[in-house]
Amino acid sequence: MEIVFYHPSEPVEPWIAGMHKRLPGAHLRAWLPGDSLPADYALVWHPPVEMLAGRRGLKGLFALGAGVDALMQTLRLHPRMLAENVPLLRLEDTGMAEQMVEYVLAAVLRYYRRLDEYYLYQRQGSWRELALNDKRGFIIGVAGAGVLGQKVACTLAGRGFPVRCWSLSRKSIPQVASFAGDEQLPDFLSGLQVLVNLLPNTPRTEGILDGELFARLNRGAFVINVARGAHLVEADLLAALARGQIAAATLDVCREEPLPPGHPFWRTPRITLTPHIAAVTIPSLAMDSIAENIRRIEAGVPPLGLVDRAQGY
Ligand code: NAP
Ligand code: GLV
């Protein structure tokens, strides 16, 4: 079995050994320009068009992450790059949900426990107590109730926060109020103190975090964007922060990554930036899941993590 691999920054060696260990008959090679030799499977992150264009005989294309927006965008530009019948698969959880839960919980608790205000008082040499926020009024909305969003929502609900989620289809999650579809978006947003974005980036969700949406949140709400930079209209966030409509934002993702030097986000004190690390791919767990999926495909069993190309996620 031939597996071809492309990742712009991950070293290939652990993948060669790791996939061989999990699938003894498998031979994995790094794709290099000009390589059009046959392959049964491709494992990719942000692959060049040339790697996939015209490739025949692929039995599965595995994205080495949860979000497939970059691949979908390339497919929209080059529709013939991948035959319709080749399954496109993504990583579901594989260690990312726990990381995402930790990241979002840390950001929520920081805002709920008013830690930024205490850090400021410390710098001012001021020993001063602030009122404890009322947890019952600290309503948290998780946009995107998929593999990651559901775990985040459940954890926050388990900590005693009132939690809502928003998705395309209605969910039944204990202690989490479910809102579905565009028509329920205003009700989902109304009264939120914290908005966590865990939507996939698709043509329907791009730019969803805009001024109109911010205006529907509580005045002084917090925004945590851990999905994609393309969801956010950056100028609208800066304006909402300046007006006090949004009190602070935690952004793990940006439209342009790395964030360019001189970008206003670098010097906006109420924006906290991290370099797209909220939930990273853990190679050993990703390989376990990919190997299991290859076994399924080889056995004629439907694979897990199949992307709906029409929906874009
Ligand atoms: P997922 O399982 O596909 O969940 C997506 C959720 O969004 C689903 O609940 C889906 O609704 C909902 N949704 C999609 N389009 C919608 C729309 N137009 N309106 C309302 N809801 C919509 O994805 P996931 O594995 O949880 O990952 C979510 C995203 O997190 C990824 O796409 C990726 O961009 C991002 N991510 C970021 C990091 C990081 O380090 N920052 C790491 C991993 C992933 P249904 O349930 O009804 O289908
Ligand atoms: C990371 O952002 C991913 O989509 O896995």
Image (tube, helix red, strand yellow):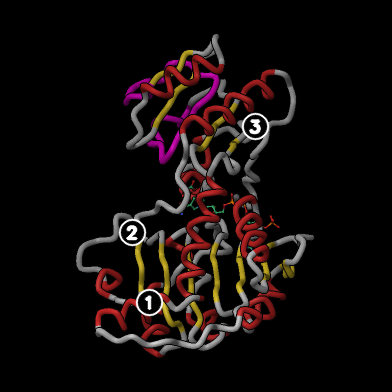
Residue 85: give its label.
Answer: 3
Give the residue pinned by disc 2: 256
Q: Is residue 61 left or right of residue 114?
A: right
Q: What residue type is disc 1 on?
A: Asp
Task: Locate the N terminus and report the quarter of the image it occupies.
Answer: top right
Q: Are marks 2 and 1 in contact (CB under 8 Å)?
A: no
Number of numbered discs? 3
Give the residue pinned by disc 1: 116
Q: What residue type is disc 3 on?
A: Asn
Q: Is residue 243 left or right of residue 141?
A: left
Q: Is residue 56 left or right of residue 188?
A: left
Question: Which segment is the magenta one?
Answer: 30-54
Name the element at disc 1.
Answer: helix
The image shows residue 309 at horizontal and vertical percentages of 62, 45
The image shows residue 175 at horizontal and vertical percentages of 75, 66
Name the element at disc 2.
Answer: loop
The image shows residue 290 at horizontal and vertical percentages of 57, 29
- Point 27% across, 73% down: residue: 264
**Between residues 81 and 236, which one lies in front from this camera angle?**
236
Q: Quadrant of ligand 1?
A: bottom right
279 over 185 or under it: above or below? above
- Point 45% across, 34% down: residue: 44
